[in-house]
Image (cartoon, helix red, strand yellow):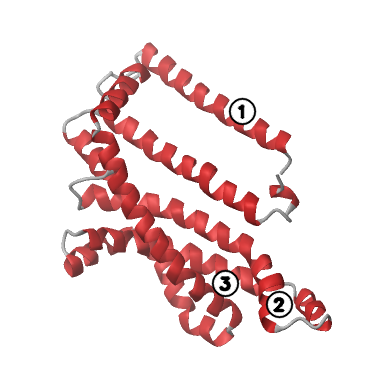
Amino acid sequence: MPDGIRVTEKKLEIISIVLFFIAWKIITSLGIFPPLLLPPPEVAIANFIDMLLSGELLTHILVSLRRVFTAFLLAAVLGIPWGIAAGRSDVFRGLSGWYVRAMLCLGGIAWIPLSILWFGLSETARVFVILMGSLPPVVMNTMEGFRNINPNYIKAAKTLGAKPIEIFRTVVLPSSLPYILSGLRLSMGFGFRVMIAAELIAASAGLGYLLEAARAIGKTQEGIMVMLTIVGLEMLIEDLGFKNLERRLLKWRPEVRV
């Protein structure tokens, strides 16, 4: 993607965020909702700063990120080889396909009751639930990447005398890499969603726990800022992590070229 377009998109995103806070302020000024249900943005921001300075928010952020990234790494380690095998073998795809569809259908949230029965109210249970939600997109996208490789590229490489390992390194992997990265990107987003649900129900720390605690004591401003914190973290990971990774690994694609 050309630098000019990328900069313009980022500016528009910032403008959109500013407009969101302006709309929030206008709605609260009109008194459409009572302050207990929708406090003004300055109250929520002040609460956010207090939690940040006290270290409370940072502690919960680190707990949630540890769970999400642990599940994400497990999803990558399990999902990429699974997707490669399913993409390269019709037999393996036929045998394992319904497992992936079942996990995608259930998501991670449906696994919460079983995870509590199997692992108790432990970190293992929470990571397991997040893993069940974040694994399917890695498997499915990797599989599609390996299934959609242009066979003419492979034939051309063989004609030029390339060995199987060279074909994999120079043709197969570059062709499937955009799909794999897309799957990992989706996996991270799915992981955050499931993390919130898991921590709402069965956790004593984390951002989901903070959301439930805010509801229990009626601190709407805290709940709103925790929600925005989750969104901000995910966007930060997208911008600093995946987008930079794509620009480094996929320079040959015009839409991501630096």
- Choose the circle earlier in sequence order: 3 or 2: 3
User: Residue 174 in the image: x percent, y percent?
Assistant: 67, 66
Counting other residues with Cα less than 10 Å from the Cα at mark 3, is it few (<14), some (14-19), or many (20 or more)? many
Q: Amino acid at mark 1?
A: Lys
For the point 19% across and 29% down, the residue is: 218
For the point 50% across and 55% down, the residue is: 186
Counting other residues with Cα less than 10 Å from the Cα at mark 2, is it few (<14), some (14-19), or many (20 or more)? some
Would you place residue 55 above or below residue 133 in this image? above
What whole-number distance in Å separates the C-alpha atoms at marks 2 and 1? Answer: 41 Å
Secondary structure of residue under mark 3: helix
User: Residue 233 in the image: x percent, y percent?
Assistant: 42, 40
In the image: residue 192, left or right of residue 245: left
- Choose the circle earlier in sequence order: 1 or 3: 1
Judging by the rendered image, the residue that carries numbered circle 1 is 11
Secondary structure of residue under mark 1: helix
Would you place residue 179 above or below residue 217 in this image? below
Judging by the rendered image, the residue that carries numbered circle 2 is 167
Q: Amino acid at mark 3?
A: Met
Judging by the rendered image, the residue that carries numbered circle 3 is 143
In the image: residue 237, left or right of residue 59: right
Would you place residue 148 above or below residue 60 in this image? below
Dot in front, 3 or 2: 2
Dot in front, 2 or 1: 2
What whole-number distance in Å separates the C-alpha atoms at marks 3 and 2? Answer: 18 Å
In the image: residue 55, left or right of residue 6: left
The quadrant of the rendering that contains the N terminus is top right
Confirm or deny contact between disc 3 and disc 2 (CB under 8 A): no
